[in-house]
């Protein structure tokens, strides 16, 4: 497969939430092992009260504001800007996700499928605060390792998930493990990914590659997300992935 570019679709989700959704959308339901990618902005007072999930793992990464996560396992904790929350829905979890009381909360929620042999896992929750996220300086830029080498985040599916900020002239060369597939999504500005121009709110999807080269001639921010596909059908319906 060659690479291809898709733009996120803007829409309202819940009450007071604006979501730029890369997938699932009608024409593009998932990219095994990834099931959902939402670039969200939630206004103060809005949010997602108690609702169920099962069959996957979700990661919420907060850029701005904070998110309070409360679940039926007894977890009740708030992550602020630069931090992550991971819930493993497994055989079933009920949780609420409520942004901070003041100002807008911005971030990314991403779902990774669980393979069928792990769908019945006990649910679990983990929080990684900003000061525990490893950071590396690169040429005219900085990389934060949300998942992958050095990150304390534990997932049942191997995923390399990076937050990359580039200044003008910034460049990242990232090795991709054999068999992984994924995408680079641009949060802000624009950049070139393996020679292809990608704009804010769009992503370039890739597989069968050994490295991703990202460069920018202006200030930009992007997320790199690659994982090992399970090669199983993904049946996502609402909050469930069976
Ligand atoms: Co949820």
Image (spheres, rainbow, N blue to C red):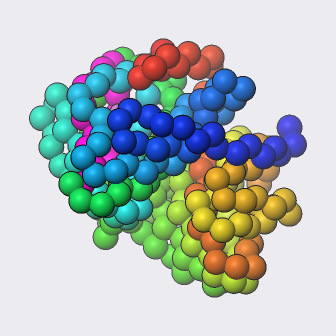
Q: Is residue 204 left or right of residue 71?
A: right
> Which x, y percent locates residue 230?
61, 27
> Which x, y percent locates residue 175?
69, 60
The picture quadrant where one finds residue 171 is bottom right
Nearer the observer, 28 or 93? 28
Q: Is residue 94 above or below residue 138?
A: above
Nearer the observer, 98 or 128? 98
Which quadrant does the N terminus fall into?
top right
The picture quadrant where one finds residue 52 is top left
Q: Is residue 195 above or below residue 136?
A: above
> Which x, y percent locates residue 6?
74, 43
Q: Is residue 76 left or right of residue 170?
A: left
Our reading of the magenta stretch's main secondary structure is strand
Taking the image in four quarters, ligand 1 sits in the one at top left
Q: Is residue 178 left or right of residue 194?
A: left
Query: Looking at the image, which residue is at 21% across and 54% down?
Result: 101
Q: Is residue 209 above or below residue 138?
A: above
Q: Is residue 16 left or right of residue 201?
A: left
> Which x, y percent locates residue 189?
66, 68
Query: Looking at the image, which residue is at 57% across and 72% down?
Result: 165
Query: Looking at the image, which residue is at 52% across and 19% down?
Result: 236
- Asked whether residue 231 is in view, the answer is no
Residue at the left extreme, as displayed: 74
For residue 88: magenta?
yes
Which stretch appears magenta? Answer: 83-100
For residue 51: magenta?
no
Query: Looking at the image, which residue is at 49% across and 16% down?
Result: 237
The picture quadrant where one finds residue 69 is top left
- Asked whether residue 9 is in view, the answer is yes
């Amino acid at each position: 497969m060659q690479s291809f570019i898709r733009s996120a679709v803007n829409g309202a989700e819940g009450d007071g939430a604006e979501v730029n959704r890369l997938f699932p959308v009608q024409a593009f339901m998932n990219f095994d092992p990834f099931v959902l990618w939402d670039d969200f902005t939630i206004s103060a007072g809005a949010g997602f009260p108690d609702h169920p999930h099962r069959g996957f793992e979700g990661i919420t990464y907060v850029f701005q504001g904070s998110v309070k996560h409360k679940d039926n396992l007894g977890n009740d904790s708030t992550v602020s800007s630069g931090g992550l929350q991971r819930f493993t829905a497994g055989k079933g979890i009920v949780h609420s996700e409520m942004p901070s009381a003041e100002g807008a909360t911005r971030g990314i929620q991403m779902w990774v499928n669980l393979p069928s042999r792990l769908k019945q896992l006990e649910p679990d929750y983990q929080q990684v605060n900003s000061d525990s996220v490893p950071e590396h300086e690169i040429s005219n830029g900085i990389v934060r390792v949300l998942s992958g080498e050095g990150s304390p985040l534990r997932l049942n599916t191997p995923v390399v998930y990076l937050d990359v900020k580039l200044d003008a002239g910034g460049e990242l060369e990232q090795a991709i493990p054999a068999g992984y597939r994924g995408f680079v999504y641009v949060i802000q500005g624009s950049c070139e990914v393996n020679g292809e121009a990608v704009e804010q709110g769009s992503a370039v999807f890739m597989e069968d590659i050994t490295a991703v080269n990202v460069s920018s001639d202006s200030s930009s921010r992007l997320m790199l997300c690659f994982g090992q596909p399970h090669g199983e059908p993904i049946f996502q319906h609402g909050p469930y992935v069976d």
